[in-house]
């Protein structure tokens, strides 16, 4: 009798779980999407390193060195510059992961059997990736020393010249991981709080059957949306301030930029998070559906942001998809503000992207919410 009751109770739970069409879709689609994302995105191997070259030697030796880098299939010399300022700008704006500077006496020093200095500069804002990139560069230079130079100058009585690497890491010279991860976690918490609590607050009214009662009161719809989003936006902003302040004081995070720029970025970022929360609440009928839908969005947003796994390593189609991810742009802003000390003149494309995505998502979600109520 007990087994029969248990069987019928389990049967009832399965019926309740599967009777809703939206829940069935999430149960089927979510694991497949997660599998694809994890399969393509979670990868610590480096397949592409964007490299800037500043060649003052312009000699056969320097060209052979550059070919050794580009011939590896990993380093892509996408920019050759003529000034130190251009090299700095490439790293500063995040267009290059690594730069090499070949001095004017490079070939002459090698030919006379001396050590020729080679400066290799890495962007240290993503500390774990910077260390790997520098190790790849060091391995290629060592290979050039062992093969190319000994083959070209095998009979010199005074020995053959060698390339002497001078490795530098900009913006995070000690490669402290916490300098990058702590501010990024703060941004993720902003998205988590604003998205989940916004979606649950509206769905809660649906489940209680009070949303219709609210709509027949004098309160206007925009006031209803504002009342449901502003409290959580303020909580998220306060949380960002607390976490960031704690990180600066406790973890000794550098923050040479303006707090106003950080606050402005968080507000733009919140537009998207709140808009997605409204959208989830509009299409969901229960709090269970809302939470499942929220995490269905949060995990891909986190993985496709470049926070842990480099976007350059992802397949081309996935890289295009990351352009729609607001978390990607807030991370670039955080790196710039906390580690590089740059301002609006460098980060304005990320602010513009956040504004466009935020206004579009928030506006479309409100329109859909009004349509559903009608």
Image (tube, rainbow, N blue to C red):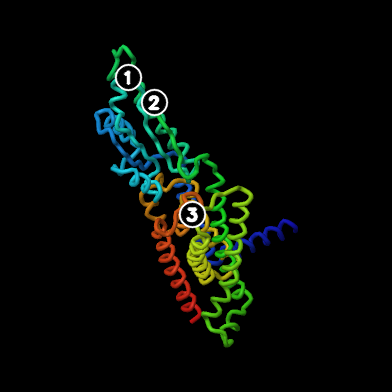
Q: Mark 1 or mark 2, which has the lower sequence index? A: 1
Judging depth in this view, the residue of 192 and 146 nearest the camera is: 146
Q: Is residue 172 left or right of residue 200?
A: left
Q: Mark 2 or mark 3, which has the lower sequence index? A: 2
Q: Mark 1 or mark 3, which has the lower sequence index? A: 1
Q: Is residue 49 left or right of residue 254?
A: left
The Cα–Cα distance between marks 1 and 2, rounded to whole angstroms, is: 16 Å
Element type at mark 1: loop
Judging depth in this view, the residue of 48 and 182 nearest the camera is: 182
Element type at mark 3: helix
Whether tag 2 and tag 3 are in contact, CB under 8 A, the answer is no
Whether tag 1 and tag 2 are in contact, CB under 8 A, the answer is no
The Cα–Cα distance between marks 1 and 3, rounded to whole angstroms, is: 45 Å
Foreground: disc 2 or disc 3: 3
In the picture shown, does residue 177 fall above or below 288? above
| Disc 1 residue crowd, few under 14, some 14–19, many 20+, Cα 10 Å | some
Residue 222 spot, x, y in % from top left? 51, 79
What residue sits right under mark 1 in the picture?
Answer: 113
Q: Write down the quadrant of residue 329 in the picture.
A: bottom left
Q: Quadrant of the N terminus?
A: bottom right
Q: Write down the quadrant of residue 360 in the picture.
A: bottom left
Residue 129 spot, x, y in % from top left? 46, 41
Foreground: disc 1 or disc 3: 1
Residue 140 spot, x, y in % from top left? 37, 29
What residue sits right under mark 2 in the picture?
Answer: 142
The Cα–Cα distance between marks 2 and 3, rounded to whole angstroms, is: 35 Å
What residue sits right under mark 3 in the picture?
Answer: 337
Outermost residue on the right side: it is: 1
Foreground: disc 1 or disc 2: 1
| Disc 3 residue crowd, few under 14, some 14–19, many 20+, Cα 10 Å | many
């Amino acid at each position: 009798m007990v087994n029969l009751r248990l069987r019928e109770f389990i049967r009832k739970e399965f019926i309740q779980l599967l009777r809703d069409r939206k829940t069935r879709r999430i149960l089927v689609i979510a694991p497949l999407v997660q599998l694809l994302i994890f399969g393509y995105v979670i990868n610590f191997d480096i397949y592409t390193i964007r490299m800037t070259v500043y060649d003052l030697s312009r000699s056969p030796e320097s060209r052979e060195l550059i070919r050794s880098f580009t011939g590896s299939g990993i380093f892509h010399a996408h920019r050759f510059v003529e000034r130190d300022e251009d090299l700095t700008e490439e790293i500063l704006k995040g267009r290059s992961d690594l730069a090499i500077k070949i001095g004017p006496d490079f070939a002459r020093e090698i030919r006379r059997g001396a050590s020729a200095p080679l400066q290799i500069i890495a962007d240290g804002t993503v500390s774990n990736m910077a260390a790997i990139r520098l190790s790849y560069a060091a391995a290629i230079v060592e290979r050039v020393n062992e093969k190319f130079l000994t083959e070209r100058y095998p009979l010199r009585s005074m020995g053959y010249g060698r390339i002497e690497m001078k490795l530098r890491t900009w913006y995070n010279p000690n490669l402290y991981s916490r300098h990058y991860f702590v501010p990024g976690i703060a941004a993720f918490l902003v998205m988590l709080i604003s998205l989940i609590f916004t979606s649950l607050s509206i769905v809660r009214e649906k489940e209680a059957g009070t949303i219709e009662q609210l709509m027949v009161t004098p309160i206007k719809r925009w006031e209803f949306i504002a009342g449901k989003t502003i409290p959580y936006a303020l909580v998220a902003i306060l949380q960002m301030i607390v976490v960031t302040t704690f990180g600066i004081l406790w973890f000794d995070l550098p923050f040479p930029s303006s707090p106003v720029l950080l606050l402005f970025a968080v507000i733009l970022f919140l537009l998207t998070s709140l808009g997605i929360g409204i959208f989830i609440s509009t299409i969901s009928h229960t709090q269970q559906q809302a939470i499942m839908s929220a995490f269905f969005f949060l995990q891909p947003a986190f993985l496709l942001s470049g926070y842990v796994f480099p976007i350059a390593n992802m397949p081309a189609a996935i890289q295009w998809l990351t352009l729609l991810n607001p978390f990607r742009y807030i991370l670039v802003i955080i790196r710039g503000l906390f580690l590089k000390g740059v301002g609006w003149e460098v980060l304005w494309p990320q602010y513009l992207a956040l504004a466009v995505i935020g206004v579009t998502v928030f506006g479309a979600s409100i329109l859909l919410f009004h349509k559903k109520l009608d």
